[in-house]
């Protein structure tokens, strides 16, 4: 039988609609589940990931073999090895050990008329997550949604489909062993782009929230087309500012780590700002460190004067998230100019200052309007695991609902419970 494009789209639409119905049903079960049941499911899922590490690595090897056309940064995000699989399992186990957010009383008060109010954390409902390359997001997102009592519909990138399926199976093993519905964490089975369109349309009212995790084009599409609320982040155009009072040893180590520990993560520093007073000394040493480590540098005139291998930065460079071994370097007159540059070119993701001057540091922390601001630490700490969240769904750069690493508590809403003793309103 001839299979037409219309038939494929129709099949995808039917599949997505069925997934939406199943997720809604599962969300009702999860909302009534106990913390112990969800903890047990996560513990068993972590065990299943460890037990199935070999199969997960085989699946990932197949994905990597098919991904020859991807950039180095994207291949790094896609690649799993024994260490990364173990870290993924550890992340799920850490989420299992987190305090359960559901039922937490956020606020408690009594009015003069005797009415008692409590604002209590509850699940959002059904969360759709669209992501690229990183198969570990399958486990991270599934675990965080389960911890917070939400059903999840996950749509990974086509390049990571085999790896995501292998990790998803392990998560399902945990759900089934704990007696929770397997439909609580669903993975879209097709690479058909129409599946994303169906999710953006809301799956006939089944989806309560969409979360994109990927490149700028993916996030922009989701934000532009979604008919449900979106919790997303822009790219990580992050800065590390070397203040005149920076400790040279700290500064050099922090910049190398912030840029080169992993260039393909959203917490990687893309621009280093150096006070003009120390540009030819500490700035020169930092540039030498980066060049020796194989990092290309694009800079302003002050940076170019440090080394002939440093090329001129153009306007577009200050706005580019390289996700590669490339960094911008610029001299600034002081704190005011550094803050102004970050405000003009940053994406309100993660920015750091390196200094031993506490007053300058506190001014930077107060004035830089980013989701994460750091003092004397690498921007690569922009990670939910490093915040003690076990895992994260992403780094939210908006200002509504959640900001910074999105963990289990950030995937809850709240309701207000009011207890009275017969009060009526006059």
Image (cartoon, grey):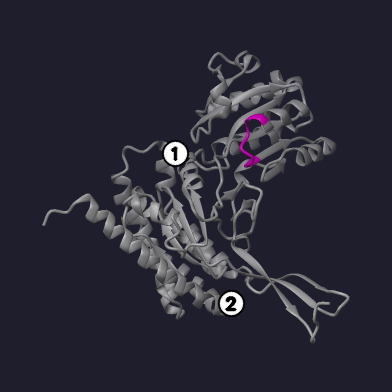
Q: Nearer the viewer, residue 265 or 348?
A: 348
Measure the C-alpha gap from mark 2 to mark 1: 38 Å
Residue 295 sits inside the magenta stretch = no
Residue 198 at what x, y percent from top left?
39, 56
The numbered disc on residue 184 is: none
Find disc 1 in the rendering and name its residue. 73
Question: Is 188 drawn above or below residue 276 in the view shown?
Answer: below
Q: Assess disc 1: are there few (<14), some (14-19) or many (≥20) residues with their C-alpha within 10 Å of its C-alpha.
A: some
Find disc 2 in the rendering and name its residue. 35
User: Dot 2 lies on which element?
Assistant: helix
- The image quadrant where one finds the C terminus is bottom right
In screen coordinates, is 315 left or right of 103? left
Q: Quadrant of residue 268?
A: top right
Q: Nearer the viewer, residue 388 or 123?
A: 123
Give the residues in magenta.
Answer: 344-350
User: Dot 1 lies on which element?
Assistant: helix
Question: Is 171 drawn above or below residue 315 in the view shown?
Answer: below
- Residue occupying the far right of the picture: 112
């Amino acid at each position: 039988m001839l299979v037409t494009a219309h038939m494929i789209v129709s099949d995808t639409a039917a599949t997505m609609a069925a997934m939406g119905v199943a997720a809604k049903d599962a969300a009702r079960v999860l909302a009534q589940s106990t913390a112990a049941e969800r903890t047990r499911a996560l513990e068993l899922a972590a065990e299943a990931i460890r037990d199935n590490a070999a199969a997960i690595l085989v699946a990932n090897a197949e994905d990597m073999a098919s991904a020859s056309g991807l950039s180095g940064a994207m291949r790094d995000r896609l690649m799993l090895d024994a260490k990364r699989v173990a870290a993924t399992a550890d992340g799920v186990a850490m989420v299992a050990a987190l305090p359960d957010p559901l039922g937490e009383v956020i606020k408690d008060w009594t009015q003069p008329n005797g009415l008692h109010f409590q604002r209590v954390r509850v699940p959002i409902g059904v969360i759709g997550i669209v992501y690229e390359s990183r198969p570990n997001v399958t486990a991270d997102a599934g675990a965080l949604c389960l911890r917070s009592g939400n059903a999840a519909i996950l749509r990974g990138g086509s390049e990571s489909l085999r790896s995501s399926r292998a990790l998803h199976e392990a998560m399902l093993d945990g759900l089934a062993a704990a007696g929770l519905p397997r439909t609580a964490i669903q993975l879209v089975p097709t690479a058909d782009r129409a599946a994303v369109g169906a999710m953006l349309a809301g799956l006939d009212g089944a989806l309560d929230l969409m979360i994109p995790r990927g490149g700028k084009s993916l996030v922009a599409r989701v934000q532009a087309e979604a008919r449900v609320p979106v919790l997303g982040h822009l790219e990580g155009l992050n800065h590390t500012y070397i203040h005149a009072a920076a400790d040279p040893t700290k500064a050099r180590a922090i910049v190398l780590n912030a840029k080169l520990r992993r260039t393909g993560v959203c917490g990687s520093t893309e621009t280093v700002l150096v006070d003009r007073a120390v540009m030819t000394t500490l700035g020169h040493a930092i540039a030498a460190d980066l060049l020796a480590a194989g990092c290309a540098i694009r800079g302003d005139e002050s940076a170019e004067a440090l080394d002939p291998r440093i090329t001129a930065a153009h306007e577009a460079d200050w706005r580019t998230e390289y996700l590669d071994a490339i960094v911008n370097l610029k001299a600034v007159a002081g704190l005011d100019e550094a803050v102004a540059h970050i405000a003009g070119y940053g994406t309100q993701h993660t920015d750091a200052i390196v200094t031993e001057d506490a007053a300058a540091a506190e001014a930077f922390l107060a004035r830089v309007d980013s989701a994460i601001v750091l003092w004397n630490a690498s921007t690569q700490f922009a990670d939910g695991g490093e915040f003690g969240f076990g895992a994260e769904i992403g780094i939210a750069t908006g200002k509504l609902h959640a900001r910074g690493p999105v963990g289990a508590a950030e995937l809850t809403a709240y309701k207000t419970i009011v207890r009275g003793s017969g009060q009526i309103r006059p």
